[in-house]
């Protein structure tokens, strides 16, 4: 947590940026910078949704979502890195497979284009099938990842806090049970 705080730009630096000036009032809100259970869970969910649902410029969209929903902005921006140049071929292939299992896009594409007798129509039909099926899978992944991320962050945060309280209780018991030393 401390490592991330050192590397993040300050709120004042973001407010001075001329491109971000129109959003300065939203960026000045402490709710988008505070690390609390609800803000982190919202930021993670919004970032994961943007990572899968939006093919390009995911980080700016996640940041805009975070500002709109008062979620943690750094968490939303960092969670978009789930889909990066190394992972996106696998993600898109899995999204196509998931979409193909749920939807037979070829029949719909053939009706839209018409009879696929000519090569251009066949190519267009295959393109519509590929893009539509893949994007359906990406939307499914986006919704599932956002829901799992939100619930996982809520549960993880609660477990982390309860463990800290438990350690604190054990420390207090040990300290109170220890005999007093007389100098």
Image (spheres, helix red, strand yellow):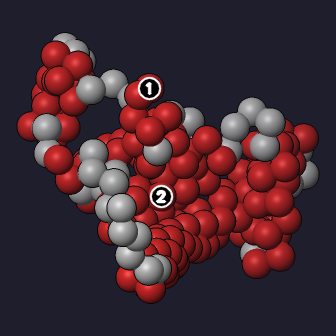
Residue at x-position 44% and y-position 85%: 177
Can the viewer see residue 26? yes
Could you say where residue 154 lies in the image, as x and y percent from the top left?
A: 45, 75
Mark 2 and mark 1 in contact (Cβ < 8 Å)?
no
Q: Which mark is residue 30?
A: none
The quadrant the C terminus occupies is: bottom left
Position of 175 compared to 48: left or right?
left
Residue at x-position 26% and y-position 59%: 69
Quadrant of the rendered image containing residue 81: top right
Could you say where residue 34 lies in the image, as x and y percent from the top left?
A: 27, 51
- Disc with the residue nearer the chain's start (1 vs 2): 1
Nearer to us in this view, 177 or 167: 177
Residue 51 vertical position relative to residue 12 in the rendered view, above or below: below
Q: Secondary structure at mark 2?
A: helix
Residue at x-position 55% and y-position 45%: 80
Q: Which residue is mark 1?
A: 7
Position of 118 compared to 80: left or right?
right
Q: Which mark is residue 44?
A: 2
Nearer to us in this view, 70 or 39: 39
Quadrant of the rendered image containing residue 96: bottom right
**Disc 1 crowd, CA 10 A, few/some/many (<14, 14-19, 20+):** few
Can the viewer see residue 130? no
């Amino acid at each position: 947590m401390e490592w991330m705080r050192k590397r993040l730009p300050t709120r004042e630096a973001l407010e001075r940026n001329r491109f971000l000036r129109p959003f300065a009032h939203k960026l000045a809100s402490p709710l988008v910078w505070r690390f609390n259970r609800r803000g982190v869970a919202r930021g993670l969910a919004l970032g994961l949704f943007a990572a899968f649902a939006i093919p390009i410029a995911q980080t700016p969209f996640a940041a805009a979502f975070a500002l709109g929903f008062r979620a943690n902005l750094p968490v939303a921006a960092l969670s978009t890195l789930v889909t990066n140049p190394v992972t996106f071929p696998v993600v898109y292939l899995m999204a196509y497979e998931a979409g193909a299992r749920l939807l037979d896009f070829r029949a719909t594409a053939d009706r839209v284009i018409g009879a696929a007798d000519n090569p251009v129509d066949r190519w267009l039909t295959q393109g519509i099938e590929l893009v539509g099926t893949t994007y359906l899978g990406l939307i499914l992944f986006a919704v599932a990842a956002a829901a799992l991320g939100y619930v996982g962050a809520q549960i993880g945060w609660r477990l982390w806090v309860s463990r800290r309280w438990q350690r604190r209780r054990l420390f207090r018991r040990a300290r109170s049970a220890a005999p007093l030393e007389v100098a």
